[in-house]
Image: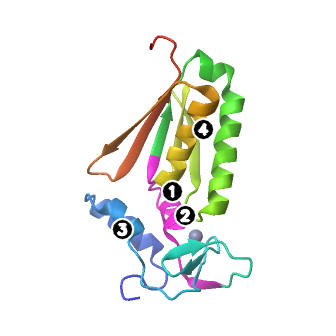
Amino acid sequence: MNRFHDDKAASAAMRRDKQPQPHTGDSYRAPLRVQSGTGCRECGAVYDNGRWLWCATTRRTGQLVCPACRRILEHAPAAELWLQGCDYLHAHREEVLALLHHQAQDEQERHALERLMQIDEQDGGLRVTTTGTHLLRRIGAALLRTHHGRFSIEYRDGDGLLRARWSHSNSDV
Ligand SMILES: [Zn+2]
């Protein structure tokens, strides 16, 4: 309760710029000292014994922002997936986009903090950002299952961001 009080979203964003430290990413995961039953004022997810859950009878307290909403507000994704542009991706673009949205929706319903942030077109490919690493891994598995290709994960120290890449190439054995 002493670390986060009231409406500090703006100052939190500034703090992130001023302190680009390795532990920036962890700050979103750190357990907040809040009472169970407290709801996020942005999305209505409810904090319950260390977890954030969706609850049909949410009461938004107006005091707290959950880690996922903080990432969205501060444009600080937990994970980034780069879908490399290629003929296959161009030909199956709509199917791939549908897969991304379907996986994200299903994951979000199960885990309140795992959300799709953005899908941006970039250099003929797609850049996907999420609020949680679980969703990114799930999307990677679904891409492999449905569209094959290659999926690789690399974790970069320093920015606390999990980065992954998917490419569909026939040149690999
Ligand atoms: Zn929220």
Tell which circle, 1 or 4, labels the residue nearer the N-terminal end: 1
Task: Residue type at mark 1: give it.
Answer: Thr
Tag on residue 142? 4
Q: Earlier in the sequence, mark 4 or mark 2?
A: 2
Three-letter code for the amino acid on which mark 3 is drawn: Ser
Give the extent of the magenta segment. 60-79
Q: Which residue is mark 1?
A: 131
Badge 2: residue crowd in 10 Å (few <14, some 14–19, many ≥20): many
Q: Nearer the viewer, mark 3 or mark 2?
A: 2
Cα separation, mark 1 vs mark 4, equals 18 Å
Query: Where does label 2 land, which residue?
Result: 113
Tags 2 and 1 touching, CB below 8 Å: yes
* Residue occupying the point 51% across, 56% down: 131
Mark 1 or 4: in front is 4
Left or right of 173 on screen, residue 63: right
Question: What residue type is disc 2 on?
Answer: Leu
Circle 3 residues within 10 Å: few <14, some 14–19, many ≥20: few
Closer to the N terminus: mark 4 or mark 3? 3
